[in-house]
Image (cartoon, grey):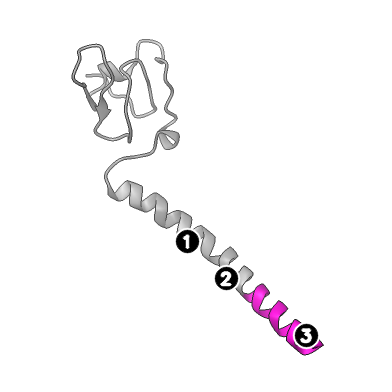
Amino acid sequence: MTPSETESTRRRWLQRAGLAIVAAPALAAFATSSARAAGKTPKADVGYQFTPHGDQHCGACTSFIPGDSRQGAGTCKIVDGVIPQSGWCSLFSKR
């Protein structure tokens, strides 16, 4: 490989790396907006924890949707994923 070919290859590689660095935040934002477009917020975004916060817990929240069994996990109108009744997040609203 001649020096000019090596330089050309290196230049292409650097251009592609630069493009990837610039595009990464846009791709991350797209992934987050896709999840939100489905109408659910990721647990990490609302400070979700699997234990109650004092007397506040998912089973007593207006957004909680009970599962098949009275004591089992359910879902939430706002937060994505399976939600145990004993969990809690910053969006808690007493039923």
Q: Residues within 10 Å of mark 1 (few under 14, many from 20)?
A: few
Relative to 85, residue 18 above or below: below
Judge by depth and name the residue closer to the eye, 9 or 1.
1
Which-is-in-front pick, marks 1 and 3?
3
Q: Can residue 16 be found in the magenta stretch?
A: no
Q: Circle 2 is placed at which residue position?
A: 19
Q: Residues within 10 Å of mark 2 (few under 14, many from 20)?
A: few
The CA span between labels 2 and 3 is: 26 Å
Q: For residue 77, what is the image quadrant?
A: top left
Q: Can residue 11 be found in the magenta stretch?
A: yes
Classify residue 91 as left or right of residue 62.
right
CB within 8 Å, label 2 to label 3: no
Q: Earlier in the sequence, mark 1 or mark 3?
A: 3
CB within 8 Å, label 1 to label 3: no
Position of residue 90 measured from the top left corner of the image (x, y, whole percent): 39, 28
Q: Residue drawn 35% across and 15% down? A: 86
Where does the C terminus fall, quadrant-wise? top left
Labelled disc at residue 1: 3
Q: Residue furthest front?
A: 1
Which-is-in-front pick, marks 2 and 1?
2
Classify residue 60 as left or right of residue 25.
left
Q: Circle 1 is placed at which residue position?
A: 26
> Type of residue at label 3?
Met
Q: Residue drawn 27% across and 44% down? A: 39
Residue interval drawn in magenta? 2-15
Mark 3: secondary structure: loop
Q: For residue 9, what is the image quadrant?
A: bottom right
Q: Residue drawn 44% across and 55% down? A: 29
Q: Residues within 10 Å of mark 3 (few under 14, many from 20)?
A: few
> Type of residue at label 2?
Leu
Classify residue 1 as left or right of residue 88.
right
